[in-house]
Image (cartoon, rainbow, N blue to C red):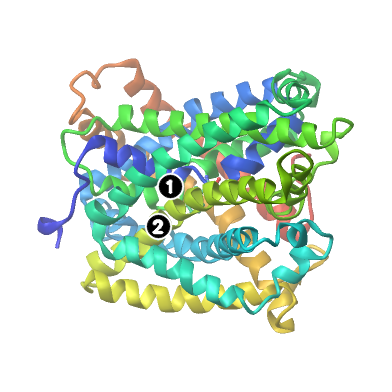
Amino acid sequence: MSASREHFSSRIGFILAAAGSAVGIGNLVGFPVNAAKNGGGAFLLMYALFVFLICLPVMIAEMAVGRNTAKEPVGAFKTLSKGSKLWGAAGFLGVLTPFMIAVFYMVITVWIFGYIALTVTGHLDYLASDVGFGEFINSPYLYIALIAVAGIVSFILAAGVKDGIEKAAKILMPALLTMLILMVVFVLSLDNAMAGVTFFLVPDINKITPSVVNGALSQAFFSLSLGMGILLTYGSYINKQTNIPNSAKLVAITDTSVAFIAGLMILPAVFSFNPEVNPSELSDSSVSLIFTFLPKIFLALQTSLGYVGASAVAAFFFLLVFFAAITSLVSIIEVPVSYLVTEKKHSRKKALGYLTLTAGVLTLFATASFGMVPFFTEFTSYAGGTKSLFDVIYDVFYDTILPLNGFLLCIFVSYRWKKKQLSEELSIGNENYKGSWVEKYINFSLGTFIPVIVLLIFINTVATKFFAANLFGF
Ligand code: TRP
């Protein structure tokens, strides 16, 4: 199969696809609010340092493993470890994780789709009402939205790497950036917008506590699509002329810039809605922000824009979020697709069929875990609380296994594949790599402090999430 492996047609296509994967709902809503609440400018600076000093080496290593083997996580780990069962299992975790994350991300994307449908049909007032979201997530119409979203994602993936993933990224990413900038310009023209900008940017070093540091690092790690097998799989579709460290740097810059620019949209909007707002009371969760708080802000615009105008702004915003979500979903489902095609020798269409069916059924269950079906709603309990199926998938795969995957990758690359091989791979397409300080930094950090830090995050998450114990005081 690898002889006929498809490739991205251009470096920019690859960068846009990888950035499309990284830019998601978290960048647009979660990041701005977290940054504003947790130290403003000081948080931003710390976040940027984490992205470049800790996350970028991991991203580069993932891409290098992918390009070197021209395989997805299972095949890549097996090939480079010369068939080790243990590393094969680590690779399998790298395929199972994206599959499960796809399920919970799909649920949220389906909701976004529903919000677009309801705003364009004139129901913004309902979504902004106190009962709106609670009723919405239990509506049987969601299943129609699920079919629509699954259809769009399958349609893109069925067309392949070049004509599907790359083409979608080339259309959706520029559209997303343009829409984001238009939204920023619009929001900045509202009353009191500048108070929001100030709140977002003015540093407050006192707010940087150990738990904020931990949160910032986890957020940077997740936001860049690390530990999901995505960058490894996308890396397997790039050619030998591509300069990996440079491309990875551009992906990280794009992802971080979008998160930063989104702050210039969200915080001013919050302040223009309510200049008296105390942002430390804003919810931490992207979900409640997007689905319950923002509709109220959009509805308030009707005093100046009228109901139709306010609905149009809301629909525009949800469409922007939808584009961000679709490119992330596509990237994450490509990992199991690639596994079935490369390792199990299925045709792409058949692989997609299996996955749409299995992920679709699981998404159905997860969608029903907000009250519709008691079995999924009260699925289990740990750390003193009842957890729905959705919570379990989120806690186990997104919060816990991702850092573990990151840790395994660092150890694998440094001590099994070996740094010499990594350097060889990275110097292809980048003649100046060998002997550079970038090489020295990557080789040193990947074998020492990065895995240690990521492992600490993993242990801390397991302790807090599942045993309600806080080991390190953060
Ligand atoms: N940056 C994404 C977000 O903010 C998180 C993410 C990265 C993601 N890669 C992904 C989510 C792939 C789903 C699929 O939401």
Callout 2: 10 Å neighbours few (<14), some, many (20+)? many
In this rendered view, identify the residue nearer to me: 345 or 78: 345
Q: Which mark is residue 330?
A: 2
Q: Amino acid at mark 1?
A: Ser
Tag 1 near tag 2, CB within 8 Å: yes
Q: Which mark is residue 385?
A: none
Q: Residue at x 46, y 35 (%)?
A: 178
Q: Position of residue 325 (x, y in %)?
A: 50, 53
Residue indicated by mark 1: 21
Q: Residue at x 87, y 34 (%)?
A: 278
Q: Quadrant of the C terminus?
A: top right
What is the tally of numbered marks visible in this picture? 2
**Residue 456 can be seen, yes or no:** no
* Residue at mark 1 to residue at mark 2: CA–CA distance: 8 Å
Q: Amino acid at mark 2?
A: Val
Q: Secondary structure at mark 1?
A: helix
Q: Quadrant of the N terminus?
A: bottom left
In this rendered view, identify the residue nearer to me: 392 or 319: 319
In this rendered view, identify the residue nearer to me: 41 or 437: 41
Residue sitting farthest toward the right: 276
